[in-house]
Image (spheres, rainbow, N blue to C red):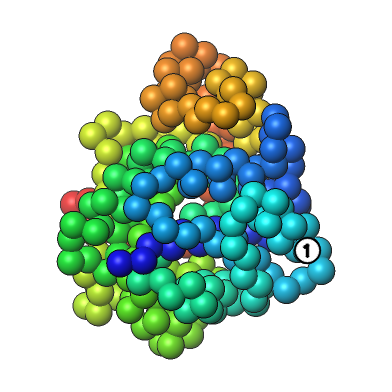
Amino acid sequence: MKTVAIIQARMGSTRLPGKVMMQLMDRSVLGHVINRLQQVKFIDEIIVATSTLQMDDVIEDEAIKCGVSVFRGSEQDVLSRYYEAAIRANAEIIVRVTSDCPLIDPETTALIIEAFLQSDLDYLTNKLVKTFPRGLDTEVFTMGALNEAYNKAVKPEQREHVTPYIYQNPDQFKFNFYKGEVDHSQHRWTLDTPEDWELISEIFKRLYHPGQIFSLNACLDLMDKHPELVEINRHIHQKELDELKLEEENSK
């Protein structure tokens, strides 16, 4: 079954405009996300899905430079962007990752995909019931589930955030939550604010070597040895959708 990773990316971030093209050591934030996903077994193709806005031309250029496919579609209707990109790629399984996660962990993502492929699920994720650091979020779902969402989702937040229609309708889809053995959800390694940038920059300065991918465990060890790093962005509130309510209901 053809498994396609689709990375959504745009320059028009609300809190940190242009964040995906910020230079992080020897490549852009987006470049690191792509590089890390290129190490994930089970992924057959990577697509960067951006908008048709002129400001996002630079994202298309970066994706081409990194050797991956590009799809350009609606800025606001990200669900349609994913659907059309998946159709073009003849995807059967879609892996959804966002471009503000330069610490996405190849091993974790591979384990989630493997668990999905060995199941009869329509949707599997580690992001709703949180045990992994924020910034390792991975969603895996079938083309059938994406097709249903594309044709039936009507609420603006369902169109913007791609997958809510799936996990808000447990009577229509088989889904589950991928959990780690230890809860590390107190860590925030996604890029949405200047404080996030400060932390991520510090992590890369201390762990990154060109041509190598440092692991989740290396990051956790660094946080344990330098707890002051955790404090840099501990106060940042992550924008949520219906995730907290869903998490509550499914963790009882």
Q: Position of residue 151 (x, y in %)?
A: 43, 88
**Relative side of 224 to 203, left or right:** left
In the displayed orientation, state which residue is furthest to the top: 225
Q: Nearer the viewer, residue 117 or 171?
A: 117
Task: Residue 131: tell me if it is visible.
Answer: yes
Residue 158 drawn above or below residue 121: below
On screen, residue 132 versus residue 180, left or right, reads: right
Which residue is at a point 42% across and 58% down the rendered structure image? 44
Which residue: 35% across, 41% down? Answer: 108
Say whether residue 172 is left or right of residue 135: left
> Between 136 and 16, which is closer to the camera in this rendering?
136
95 relative to 65 in the view: left or right: left
**Callout 1, which amino acid?**
Asp
Q: Nearer the viewer, residue 87 or 176?
A: 87
Residue 212 in the image, given as x and y percentages of width and height: 53, 27
Circle count: 1
Label 1 sits on a secondary structure element that is helix
Res 127 seen here: no
Which residue is at 69% across, 38% downward? 27
- Residue 233: percent from the left, percent from the top? 59, 32
Instruction: Using a 10 Å C-alpha cutoff, classify the residue at mark 1 as few (fewer than 14 neighbours), some (14 to 19) or many (20 or more).
Output: some
User: Percent position (x, y) of residue 48?
Assistant: 59, 61
Most distant residue in the bottom direction: 151
Can you say whether 111 is above or below 239 in the image?
above
Where the N terminus falls, by quadrant? Answer: bottom left
Q: Which residue is mark 1?
A: 57
* Quarter of the figure with residue 181: top left
Residue furthest toward the right? 54
